[in-house]
Image (tube, rainbow, N blue to C red):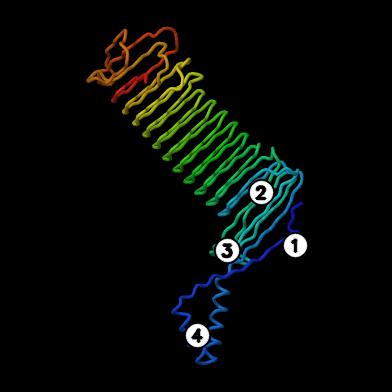
Amino acid sequence: MTGYADNFWEIRVVKWVDVNVSVESNKLLESIMKSNWQAQLFLFSLAFLFVGQNALVSRELEKHFKDVASVKIKTVSGDCIVSKNDENEVAVIVTYDYEDGEFEPRLEQRGRRLFLRERFASGSSSGRIVWRVRVPEGTDIEFSTSSGDLEVTGLASDLTAGTSSGNIELTDMNGKIKLGTASGDIRAKGVTGELDFGTASGNIVVVGASGRLKIGTASGRTTARNVEGRMQFGAASGDISIVRASGDFKVGAASGDIDADEITISDASEFDAASGDIELKLGKSPDHDLKVAAASGDVLLDFNNQSIRGRIVVTARARGDRIQSPFEFDDTVYFEERGQDYVTKIARKGSGPKIELRSDSGKAVIMSK
C-alpha cells in the first residue's frame, strides 16, 4: 500500500492577499484614474501582478494506513506533531505552502513499516510544512530532521528522535524514549519510562518524570522538577537545577553549578562538580550513603531541619576556616595531597549512612536549617 495514486490526493488551495493603501495614496489614485482610462488599465495590470506574486498557496494531503507497527519520519525543515489515534490505523495529514513542483511529500508503507519524508526540487525555495501524524498506542516512532520541530502528546510508545536545530516537546508519554539535539531545546512534561535526553548546546527542561532518567548536555542548562527514579545528570559547561526529586542520583558537572532542592535519597548517590559550586538541600534525612564533592567550588549540604544521622566526613584545605557545621567533630586528620595541606573532620551521629563532603579549593559547609 504505497499510496501514490492521484485519487488518494485531497488538495485544497487557498489564496489570499493583504493590501494596505495609505490615505494619501488613495487620493492620488482617484486623481489619476479620473484623468484617463490608460492609467486605470495600467493600475489594474499592476494590481493583478501584485496579486499573482504575493498569493500564498496552501495544500493539504491526508492518507490513512492499516497494520502499521512503526513509523519513520524524516524531514528537512518540516515540523511534526504526533498524537494518539483511538482508531487502529495511522492517519497522516501534511500541510504545505510551496508552489507547484517545489516540494512533494512522500508516504510509503512497506510491510508493517510506514515511511514519511520530504522531497524538494533542486534550487532554492521557501515555505512551511507541517506533518500531523496520529498513531495507535504501541506504535514505535522514529523521527529525524534538520531544522524542524517535533511535538508528541499522549502516547504510550517507544520514541527515538534527533534534530539539528529543531526543538522537541513531549507531553504525557510513557515508553522507551531517546532524544538528541545539536542546538535545539528539549522539553518534557509528564513522561515515564526509560528516558535518555541529550543536547550539544540546547537546554533541557523536564517536569514531572519517573523511571530511569539520563540527561546530558555539553553547554546547555538542565532543569528537572518533580522527578523520581534512577537519575543520571551530566553537563560539560552547563548548570544543573533539580527541584523536588526522589531516587538515587549520579550528578556531575565539569564547569557548571549544581543546585538541588528538596532532594530525597533512596539509594547511594553522588553529586560532583569540577569547577562549579554545589548546593544540596535535603527533603528528608538520608538513609543511604551520600557523597558531595567539588574540585574548585564550594559545597553546601543543607539538612533542612531534618535529623543529622550517620558518619559525617568533611574534607577541605587546611588553610583558613573552610569547614563549617552546626555541630562539633569527633576526630580531625591532617594530610598532604598534590602539594597541598588538607584536613578531614569526622563526626559520628548515631547509626546511619556515610555522608561525605569535600572541596579541594573552596568551602565545605553543613547546615541544619
Res 5 quadrant in image: bottom right
- Determine the image quadrant of residue 175: top right
Query: Relative to the observer, which residue lies in front, 217 or 137?
Result: 137
| Mark 1 to mark 2 CA distance (whole Å) | 21 Å
Secondary element type, mark 4: helix
Q: Which residue is mark 3?
A: 122
Q: Of the numbered discs in the image, which one, if any, rests on residue 30?
A: 4
Q: Is residue 297 left or right of residue 286?
A: left
Q: Nearer the viewer, mark 4 or mark 3?
A: 4
Cα–Cα gap, marks 3 and 2: 27 Å
The outermost residue toward the left is 320
- Residue neighbourhood size for the residue with mark 2, other residues' Cα within 10 Å, grouped as few (<14), some (14–19), many (≥20): many
The secondary element bearing badge 3 is classed as loop
Q: Which residue is mark 1?
A: 6
Decide which of 306, 2 is in the foreground and name it.
306
Identify the element where label 1 is drawn: helix
Q: Amino acid at mark 2?
A: Val
